[in-house]
Amino acid sequence: NAQDARTATSMAALKDKTAKLGAPKIQGQEEVEGKSAPVLYFGSTKMNSNFTFVDEVSKEGGPGMVATLFVKAGIQQARAAGGQEYIRVATSVVLPDGRRPVGTVMGSPALESIKGGEPYFGEVEVLGTRYITHYEPIKDASGETIGAYFVGYKK
């Protein structure tokens, strides 16, 4: 699928804001809405349940724009889930009841691309709403995929 100009701009902004904090890494585990998840950091800044950066990118992107950071589940969770799972740890998506859906997981078709270390562009249903999306792997210093960036806007 072709990349969309709006998602390209918002993805660049999200990656730029997080890169200024330092290199991405996983350090420790914590509970995210009842699910044990690795803790994602950029430099010394913890991203799990930190909505500052995703909210800034969404606001800059304009109406209907959302941003999310996913972390790759640990070996134990991945085995239990029957493969790799990416858990939403920071998001500007707000559900109708006002909650943010942290602890939910990335679905297909983006999941297949991210598992392969590749970006994904296209239309995806996210928690019941259709979005034009752009996903990219978050890679640590060794080049291993440890999570994913997501931006999208309501179709």
Image (cartoon, grey):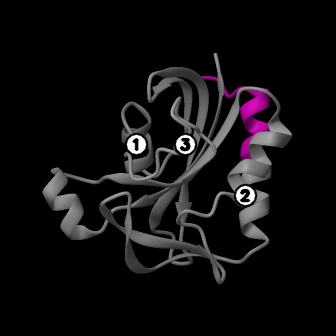
Q: Quadrant of the N terminus?
A: top right
The residues colored magenta run 1-11
Whether the magenta-drawn stretch holds residue 8 is answered as yes
Who comes first in sequence, dot 3 or dot 2?
2
- Residue 27, image x and y in percent? 46, 82
Residue at the image point whose x is 73% and y is 53% from the top: 14
Whether the magenta-drawn stretch holds residue 53 is answered as no
Identify residue for label 2: 53
Q: Quadrant of residue 11?
A: top right
Residue at the image point whose x is 30% and y is 68% from the top: 74
- Residue 86, image x and y in percent? 38, 53
Who comes first in sequence, dot 1 or dot 3?
1
Residue 119: give its label: 3
Kind of residue at disc 2: Phe
Mark 1 Cα within 10 Å, few/some/many (few <14, many 20+)? many
- Residue 112, image x and y in percent? 36, 40
Look at the numbered discs 1 and 3 and tell me whether their residues touch, using CB distance below 8 Å. Answer: no
Which of the two marks, 1 or 2, is nearer to us in this view? 2
Q: Is residue 44 above or below residue 30?
A: below
Residues 116 and 150: in front is 150
Give how far apart the Cα atoms at labels 1 and 2 are. 19 Å
Q: Quadrant of residue 47?
A: bottom right
Answer with left or right where residue 5 lies relative to residue 47.
right
Q: Is residue 112 above or below residue 53?
A: above
Q: Tell me the element at label 1.
A: loop
Residue 83: give its label: none
Residue sitting farthest toward the front: 97
Which of the two marks, 3 or 2, is nearer to us in this view? 2
Q: Tell me the element at label 2.
A: helix
Residue 106: give its label: 1
Kind of residue at disc 3: Pro
